[in-house]
Structures are given as structure tokens and as C-alpha cells.
Amino acid sequence: MDNPFESLLEEKKKEVSSSPFDSLLQMDVSGNKIEKQKLSLEPAEKKSIHTTPVKLTERSGRYRIGKPDRPHIKHDGGFLAKLRLREPTAIEKLQFAKWVTILEGLEAVCSGPSAKIVGACWYEDLSDAAAAYRHFLFGKGKDRTFNYERYILNDPAGKELLENLISDFQNHIENIGRDRIKFSVTSSAYNAGNSVDAIAPYPKTVNWQKTLGAHYLWVSADIAVSANKKGDIMYNADLIINVEDQYNFNPGQNDIASGIPDSANGIFEVTGLGSQYMHFAKVKRQITWVEKNRENSKKNGSPTSRQRKPDDNRRLRNRV
């Protein structure tokens, strides 16, 4: 005997196995049935948001992406590049004593406002030069830190160097900074005063010709990129300018101001009575500018207080 509920169960199974969307009928505004459609949860079209990858610039000019990394800098070796170290003769010891006396006269006369009326001082305060030379005679070759802010403040070539360096920095940072928000850069070496492609000329003042002369710099910086209310691209950079030079005397060269041959002091390098040494300095600046509008850059970090003379000068009045 057939089960009376069997046909009813079969109908219910068909209803359960069918997707509810399969039997959904669309109605038009008049209530008439229209073509049955299946509802899909997939988008009508699949489109890729980014079809071309963004290519970031890693290097421009002297600058590249990266943490501070001192570049290779080759300094001249002075007289020791050609001659071997040896013991001094009696005459050379007398010469050394003579130059110590000259240094003490320089420290006594060529410091402060009064130096600007003394022809023997080239009408300049030579406090920085005196401190650097004293370290050559008595520093035993130890590294020395000096105040580069005084060079920027007191020598026209120093001012020009900072302006040129910042302009070059901004130009290349705009290239590297495209499509970036935050990044760090480090640079290869700039030279100042020692070749045709120097970032700035040789020091103009006698004080800084004798203190520093031609030298090298490299830059490290952290940069943030944003947009202002006008939609302009803004750059904010914290720079560290690293300065270095080897203080020594060189064969075949003469002092610019006096004309005295470098050999008069270079002999002290060879005999160990004096010692060439490395000169180091750091300068920090904060630069803010609008892309392609560098003329209105805001530059902070310049010292607001008086820059004191070198604290390793022998005389107290030469340190203030």
C-alpha cells in the first residue's frame, strides 16, 4: 500500500533543495511578472584599482635613500705623503721655538676689536686661526672639533656655501620625495674651495684661510612630506651638515696672506714636533618649503646667541 504522505514529502524536498533566489520573480510597476533572474552576489564588473606599480626614486644628485653614512673622503697627506717621519735636528728645534713665539704674539695682538687696526694681523681677529695652529703644534695629532657656525657667520664664502648647499639639497629632495611621506637621505661628499666643481669658493678672510681652507662636507637628513590647506606639497627637513678637513701643510704651497712657504711648518710634521690632525664640525638646520617655490623657504636652526671663540685658545680673552 502506498504511503499517502510520500508524494507530499517529495514536493517539500524539491522546495528545500531549490535556492530561494531561483524562484524569485521580478514584477514590473503594473504588477506583471517579468523574466525570472538569478540574483548574484558578485560585482557586475571586476576592475583593478592599481594597474601600474609606483616607481620610487632612490637617488638624485649626491643624495640617496638611507641612514647617515659617511662617504669615502680622501684627504691629502701633507708632507708625510712624500717624506718619512724622522727625529728633528737642533736647528729644527730652534725653528719650532721661533714659531711658538710667533703664535704667542698672534694670540696677544690679533684677537678682539683691536686686531682690526693692526696691519700685522691683516686687520682681522685671528682667534680661530690661532687656536687651530696651537693644536697643530701641541695637540699630538688628536682630532679637534671647531665651530663652523662662526665660519658661516663671519666669512662670505661660508654664507655662500650654506645657501648653495641648501638649494642643491632641496632640488634633489623634491625628486626623491615624489610619492613618499617620510624618508631619510644621506649624501656623497661636497668639496668647498678645492676644485672647479666646489659648492663654494675658498675662504675669503685670512682668519678662515688659516683655520680651515679647502674642506669637505656631507649631509644627512630626515624629511616629512605633507599637503597644506591649499593643496600644495610641503617639505619639512631636518638637516645635519657634517664638515671635515685635515689640518696640515702641503709641499709646493704658500700661505695666501703672508706668502710664507708651507715647508716652514711642514717640517714639523716630518720631525714630529708638530702633528697634522682631523678637524670636525656639525651644523644643523630645519628647512620648510613648498614644492617648486623654494624662494620662500623657512630656515631655522641658526644660532641666536653670540658664537664664542674657540675654548682651546690659551688666553682667556681669546675665548669670549
Image: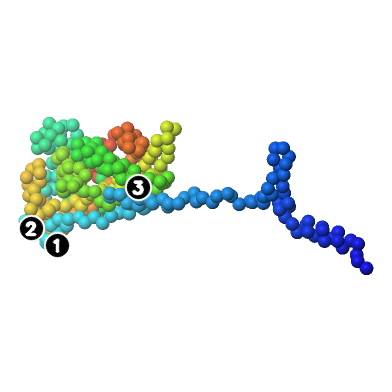
Location of mark 1 (residue): 85
Q: Amino acid at mark 2?
A: Ala
Find the distance from the CA under tag 2 to the CA under tag 1: 16 Å
Q: Amino acid at mark 1?
A: Leu
Look at the image and tell me whether residue 235 can be seen: yes
Element type at mark 3? helix
Q: Earlier in the sequence, mark 3 or mark 2?
A: 2
For label 1, the SS is: loop
Q: Nearer the viewer, mark 3 or mark 2?
A: 3
Give the label on residue 90, or none. Answer: 2
Please report the residue visible at 26 percent of the width from the left and 45 percent of the height from the top.
146
Please, which residue is most extreme toward the bottom here? 1
Q: Quadrant of the C terminus?
A: top left
Horizontal side, residue 119 vs residue 240: left or right: left
Disc 3: CA contacts within 10 A as few (<14), some (14-19) or many (>=20):
many
Q: Earlier in the sequence, mark 1 or mark 3?
A: 1
Q: Which residue is mark 3?
A: 176
